[in-house]
Amino acid sequence: MSASLGFSVERRQVLLGVAGVVLLSGCASTARTAKAAADTTGTQLRGESHTSPIPGPDEARIPGTLRPEYYVHAGHKRIALTIDDGPDPRYTPQVLAILEQHHISATFCMIGSSAKAHPALVREVIARGHHIANHTWSHPDLVNLSAASVRDQILRAEEAVHTASGGYRPTVFRAPYGAWDQSLLALCERMKLRALDWSVDPRDWSRPGTSHIVDTVLRTTRTGSIILEHDGGGDRSQTVAALRVFLPRLLSEGYHFVQP
Ligand SMILES: [Zn+2]
């Protein structure tokens, strides 16, 4: 994965105990360098990525006691679909049409500035029965921001979704890049926002090929999985093509989609 692609950056770190000990996997050894390079891309969005397809409890070792949610717990073959970084006028309508075709409800983790720019899409998502999660105002890495800036990112996004939708208030929050720490998780608690992570990540944002996205989702999904896909932040045509294939396949395997 090359940082020269702009937003193709691995940014999933599990910080362990002692300061400075950072475990990186996936494109790991280059992640810090890649992140530094990507930080120079300004406002261009980077997709988030999980470092391994199926995080076990060991991977949830964010120092401290608070944890985001990696799974849904709604029974046998219950899974959830999350669609991040929109709304986007090119891809969100296509995703909505596919979901409607298969009677699937999903959670759209929206960027506040995009929600403000495309209020009709926000209303459309709600009207079709999907949920919206707060995914910050402008998709920064919150770990690098002051507490006041983090709070502002969340509040601005909430206000944007609330205004665009005509009254919907997200009750779920997802950190950009899955970059959680205890102060962010504690803030979510204080703001009455559930912290939502994921457990199946085909890295669709990196455009690895439609078949790679399909294969990864089908190979790694199991009861409780929260699947991560993207409808914004760049060219998501592979994501759209993959959804057309893997959603009916998961349904035929007996999975049911629930809200996380
Ligand atoms: Zn995101």
Image: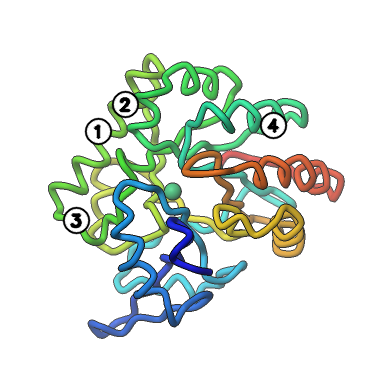
* Type of amino acid under label 1: Arg
Residue found at x 30% / y 68%: 36
Residue found at x 43% / y 57%: 6
The spot of residue 88 in percent (x, y) is 50, 31
In the displayed structure image, the side of residue 10 where residue 258 appears, left or right: right
Q: Earlier in the sequence, mark 4 or mark 2?
A: 4
Residue found at x 43% / y 36%: 110
Q: Does 20 sit above or below residue 113?
A: below
The spot of residue 227 in percent (x, y) is 61, 52
In the displayed structure image, the side of residue 94 where residue 135 appears, left or right: left
Task: Classify mark 1: residues with Cα within 10 Å, few (<14), some (14-19) or many (20+).
Answer: some
Report the residue marked by disc 4. Answer: 99
Q: Secondary structure at mark 3?
A: loop
Report the residue marked by disc 2. Answer: 160
Residue found at x 30% / y 56%: 141
Q: Secondary structure at mark 1?
A: helix
Q: Quadrant of residue 55?
A: bottom right
Report the residue marked by disc 1. Answer: 156
Q: Quadrant of residue 3?
A: bottom left
Q: Nearer the viewer, residue 204 or 22?
A: 204
Q: Which mark is residue 145?
A: 3
Tell me: is circle 1 under 8 Å from ligand 1: no
* Type of amino acid under label 4: Leu
Tell me: is circle 3 under 8 Å from ligand 1: no
* Type of amino acid under label 2: Ala
Q: Earlier in the sequence, mark 3 or mark 1?
A: 3
Q: Nearer the viewer, residue 147 or 77?
A: 147
Q: Which mark is residue 51?
A: none
